[in-house]
Amino acid sequence: FGSSCLGSSAQPPSCNSSAMAELVWACMKNSNCYSLKSRHCVTLTCEPGNLANIHCFKYSGTAQDKAVSVTCDDKQRLRLVVKRPKRNTRAKPTRQFTRIPLSTAPKKALETVKKALVEKSYRARDVNLAMARHKKLTQARSRFQQVKAKK
């Protein structure tokens, strides 16, 4: 078992991360608590770290080592949520993600998103999806605040 993922406690596991990601995806692809299935539509998901909300390996935040998401917290503040690539965080789901607060100024926040993701060498697809998600959440937040102000 020296080269398998089940290595002894004296030696660290020596399997590569892509094999672990594929194993995680194989376990969760048919059914999990995040998937939203319908009869005549693409299967969607609401898992953390999935920018496109499409249920596939390419966008999965749980299976991939590098996952990113832009979320809105309870007080309507936007946060960039980045998955930590370290292996030891897999056993501690609450420590898997780092939350970076974003500015309320849209241009400054987009610069922060782009800088943080390019600095950590995320794929260009993820950077573009994160920036698009930020724009949509900013628009939704401003609409929500307008409706709240009218009341």
Image (cartoon, rainbow, N blue to C red):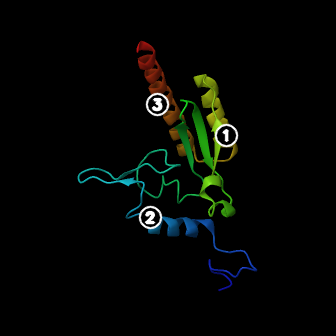
Q: Is residue 1 left or right of residue 71?
A: right
In whole angstroms, how far apart are the C-alphas of marks 1 and 3?
A: 19 Å
At label 1, which amino acid type do we have?
Answer: Ala
Q: Position of residue 100 (x, y in %)?
A: 65, 39
Nearest to the eye among marks 2 and 1: give it: 2
Instruction: Let me know if residue 96 appears in the view.
Output: no
Q: Is residue 37 left or right of residue 110?
A: left
Name the N-terminal-most of marks 1 and 3: 1
Write down the residue under mark 2.
Answer: 28
Instruction: State whether residue 127 is above or below residue 97.
Output: above
At label 2, which amino acid type do we have?
Answer: Met
Q: Is residue 27 left or right of residue 8?
A: left
In whole angstroms, how far apart are the C-alphas of marks 2 and 3?
A: 28 Å
Q: Position of residue 139 (x, y in %)?
A: 46, 25
Q: Image point 51% across, 49% down: which residue?
A: 48
Residue that lies at the very extreme toward the front in this rendered image: 151
Res 136 label: 3
Q: What SS does tag 1 mark?
A: helix
At label 3, which amino acid type do we have?
Answer: Lys
- Graded by Cα atoms within 10 Å as few (under 14), some (14 to 19) or many (20 or more), the crowding at tag 1 reads some
The foreground one among 47 and 119 is 47
Q: Position of residue 35 (x, y in %)?
A: 39, 55
Residue that lies at the very extreme toward the top in this rendered image: 150
Whether pointer 2 and pointer 3 mark residues with C-beta atoms closer than 8 Å, the reply is no
Name the N-terminal-most of marks 2 and 3: 2
- Graded by Cα atoms within 10 Å as few (under 14), some (14 to 19) or many (20 or more), the crowding at tag 2 reads some
